[in-house]
Image (tube, grey):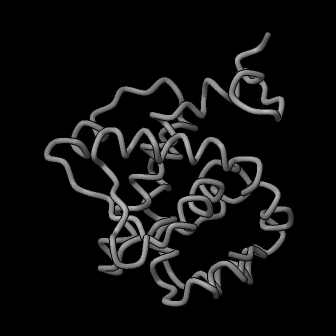
Amino acid sequence: MMLSDLLTDDPYPDELLNLYNPAYVGLVVYLAGRAYYTKSKRNVPVYFPYVMFPLIAVDSCRRRLPKKAGKLSDWARQHGDALFDFPERVTSLRPFVSSGLVFLKSHSLVKRADSDGSLRFTSRKGFIGSVDSLVLSSEEVRNELDKAPIAGRLLAAEKEISSVLAIFGLKP
């Protein structure tokens, strides 16, 4: 029996399970979530980690993310072909994002806000510094970690949750 069979009904290859382990996905989502908060001074809507991670994990999206965050609607208009099957990507990566959020919660790096159920990514002394000093053997992983804050700031530039979801062809 494959590890993927134990975790879900969907057969994910073990390579994908190894790469998208809860700690790694949690780190990517954390970096995006902290950047979202830093730019907007708002908690992260509960749906957004499920949008942030595919933006970063999928090559066709990540490679087209801007060097500096601008308006999401402008970016989507210019790179609409990269979003062709985005709702399916969100669905297929959902179990990984959920496990990453559980990992973050277990390490007190994310909390649900009482008022609206949004997510508050907490800061932890030394955590970001240790991420910056990671020695990685893969440029792709370094690129994902570098692009995570950009994805967070890109989503933070939009004030309406429904607008962001609509841009990606998603419904709450």
Residue 58, image x and y in percent?
70, 50
Q: Quadrant of residue 129?
A: top left
Residue 152, image x and y in percent?
46, 66
The residue depicted at 53 percent of the width and 35 percent of the height is: 139
Say above or below: 119 vs 73. above
Say above or below: 43 vs 129. below
Q: Nearer the viewer, residue 159 or 145?
A: 159
Relative horizontal placement of residue 70, taking residue 124 as reference (left or right): right
Q: Residue furthest left?
A: 125
Q: Quadrant of the N terminus?
A: top right
Q: Quadrant of the C terminus?
A: bottom right
Relative horizontal placement of residue 166, taking residue 10 as reference (left or right): left
Q: Nearer the viewer, residue 108 or 51?
A: 108
Q: Residue furthest top?
A: 1
Count of residue discs? 0
Residue 19, image x and y in percent?
60, 29
Say above or below: 11 vs 121. above
Residue 123, image x and y in percent?
22, 55
The residue depicted at 74 percent of the width and 83 percent of the height is: 77
Q: Quadrant of residue 73?
A: bottom right
The residue depicted at 27 percent of the width and 34 percent of the height is: 133
The residue depicted at 78 percent of the width and 76 percent of the height is: 169
Relative horizontal placement of residue 21, taking residue 76 as reference (left or right): left
